[in-house]
Image: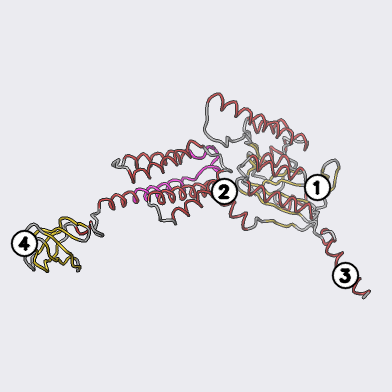
């Protein structure tokens, strides 16, 4: 019994023993590639918290980003500032950039590094509401720029970096290379690759909160962290190209459902696609005038099915959708825009489906009814019982009670003129 108790105590101690007792203090590498959106912010913040829980030696944010959503950027920066484990931002590989929100994150990190052939800057805030002009819009823009300038200056001063350059990157959208950033004291060092960065940081002193710690990165395990399946799917949806395709798919689905009530499938697919598109648009600089033009275009296409406009509504709808699509993303950054390789094929397919649906609807309205009572009008049958005012007529293999204004003999052909309930009125067909 005593031995059993000792074993139980040992098991419990193993369960609660600190993770770093088993060599968990490694180097965590988190990659940001593409726009910074709520999914990326959730991923990075979670990994920083997890690294703190397991007392890792260092967190490296490997970055190549054109920028992203301000709220997502601030969530990452808050996670960095509250971290008890040093966070190093590394703009890598060569050809990468830390623009806009990426500049803020780099400057906010405990250690800022870049690979040769990369650049940092162009942090002027993008108008996420899109559109707008005049005095009120200018006032709003000035407020956003002043707020961003003060924020990045405070981050730079906190880390002992070039606050003047940081503010200019916001106000003037200036951008510099890795070597120039090192010379201007924007970053701490330039490293050829991740391994070189890890070696360069060994025995480096880092200010963490109110204390100075010394990093021991030599011979530490480098652990690469990836998004889980849910995060990867949501990150893909947040792409401008995917968001646009989902929006058009959603609007076309709703168009088919509203113009042909009862189809169900187009309505379901359209609704789901539209909700996903609206989720993605919260991460993009959307011009709402463009979005309204797209919606108006779909409404005009639906109206064309029910209103005889000889194609005028359909043409107006197509023009509205086209203009709205090219206005939809309000950004000069190509990475935040809809690719023309996606835009024009998607527009073309949307127009083909919509115009095709209108054409088929018009053709259906023009068809002569061939079923029900109305379908009997004009049909030819054979007299089976002499029509002396009344008699029987065989039409479409069915026997009908018929009446006529003249006497018609058995075997002669007659044509249906009027349907009165279960009785028809016919006339003799001239041979």
Q: Relative to residue 261, is residue 393 depicted above or below?
A: below
- Residue 47's label in the rendered image is none
* Sequence-first disc among 3 and 1: 3
* Sequence-first disc among 2 and 4: 2
* Sequence-first disc among 1 and 4: 1
Verify CB contact (< 8 Å) between mark 2 and mark 3: no
On the image, numbered disc 1 is attached to which residue?
84
Indicate the quadrant where residue 111 lies: top right
Mark nearest the camera among 2 and 3 is 3
Rounded to the nearest angstrom, the CA distance separating label 2 from label 4 is 78 Å
Residue 93 on image: x %, y %: 65, 49
- Residue 8's label in the rendered image is 3
* Sequence-first disc among 1 and 2: 1
Verify CB contact (< 8 Å) between mark 4 and mark 3: no
Q: Is residue 338 magenta?
A: yes
On the image, numbered disc 2 is attached to which residue?
238
Q: Is residue 134 left or right of residue 321?
A: right
Rounded to the nearest angstrom, the CA distance separating label 2 from label 3 is 50 Å
Rounded to the nearest angstrom, the CA distance separating label 4 from label 3 is 110 Å
Residue 135 on image: x %, y %: 55, 23
> Mark 4, residues whose alpha carbon is within 10 Å: few (<14), some, or many (≥20)?
some
> Mark 1, residues whose alpha carbon is within 10 Å: few (<14), some, or many (≥20)?
some
């Amino acid at each position: 019994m005593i031995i059993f108790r000792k074993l139980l105590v040992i098991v419990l101690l193993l369960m609660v023993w600190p993770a770093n007792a088993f060599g968990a203090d490694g180097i965590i590498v988190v990659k940001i590639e593409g726009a910074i959106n709520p999914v990326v912010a959730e991923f990075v913040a979670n990994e920083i918290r997890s690294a703190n829980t397991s007392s890792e030696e260092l967190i490296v944010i490997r970055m190549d980003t054109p920028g992203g959503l301000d709220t997502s950027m601030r969530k990452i920066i808050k996670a960095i500032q509250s971290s008890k484990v040093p966070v190093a931002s590394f703009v890598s590989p060569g050809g990468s950039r830390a623009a806009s929100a990426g500049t803020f994150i780099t400057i906010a990190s405990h250690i800022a590094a870049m690979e040769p052939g990369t650049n940092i800057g162009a942090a002027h805030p993008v108008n996420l509401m899109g559109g707008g002009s005049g005095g009120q819009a200018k006032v709003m823009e000035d407020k956003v720029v002043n707020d961003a300038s003060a924020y990045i200056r405070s981050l730079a001063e906190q880390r002992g970096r070039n606050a003047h350059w940081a503010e200019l990157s916001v106000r003037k959208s200036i951008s510099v290379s890795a070597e120039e950033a090192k010379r201007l004291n924007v970053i701490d060092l330039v490293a050829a690759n991740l391994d070189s960065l890890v070696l360069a940081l060994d025995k480096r002193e880092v200010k963490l909160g109110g204390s100075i710690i010394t990093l021991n990165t030599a011979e530490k395990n480098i652990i690469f962290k990836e998004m889980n399946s849910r995060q990867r799917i949501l990150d893909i949806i947040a792409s401008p190209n995917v968001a646009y395709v989902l929006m058009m798919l959603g609007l076309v689905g709703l168009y088919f459902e509203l113009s042909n009530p009862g189809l169900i499938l187009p309505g379901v697919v359209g609704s789901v696609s539209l909700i996903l598109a609206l989720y993605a648009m919260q991460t993009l600089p959307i011009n709402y005038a463009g979005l309204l033009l797209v919606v108006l275009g779909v409404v005009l296409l639906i109206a064309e099915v029910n209103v005889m406009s000889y194609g005028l509504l359909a043409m107006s709808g197509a023009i509205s959708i086209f203009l709205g699509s090219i206005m939809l993303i309000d950004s000069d950054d190509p990475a935040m825009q809809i690719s023309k390789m996606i835009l024009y094929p998607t527009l073309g397919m949307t127009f083909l489906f919509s115009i095709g649906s209108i054409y088929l609807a018009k053709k259906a309205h023009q068809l002569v009814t061939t079923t029900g009572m109305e379908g009997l009008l004009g049909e030819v049958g054979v007299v089976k019982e002499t029509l002396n005012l009344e008699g029987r007529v065989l039409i479409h293999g069915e026997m009908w009670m018929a009446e006529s204004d003249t006497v018609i003999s058995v075997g002669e052909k007659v044509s249906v003129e009027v349907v009165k309930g279960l009785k028809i009125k016919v006339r003799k067909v001239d041979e």
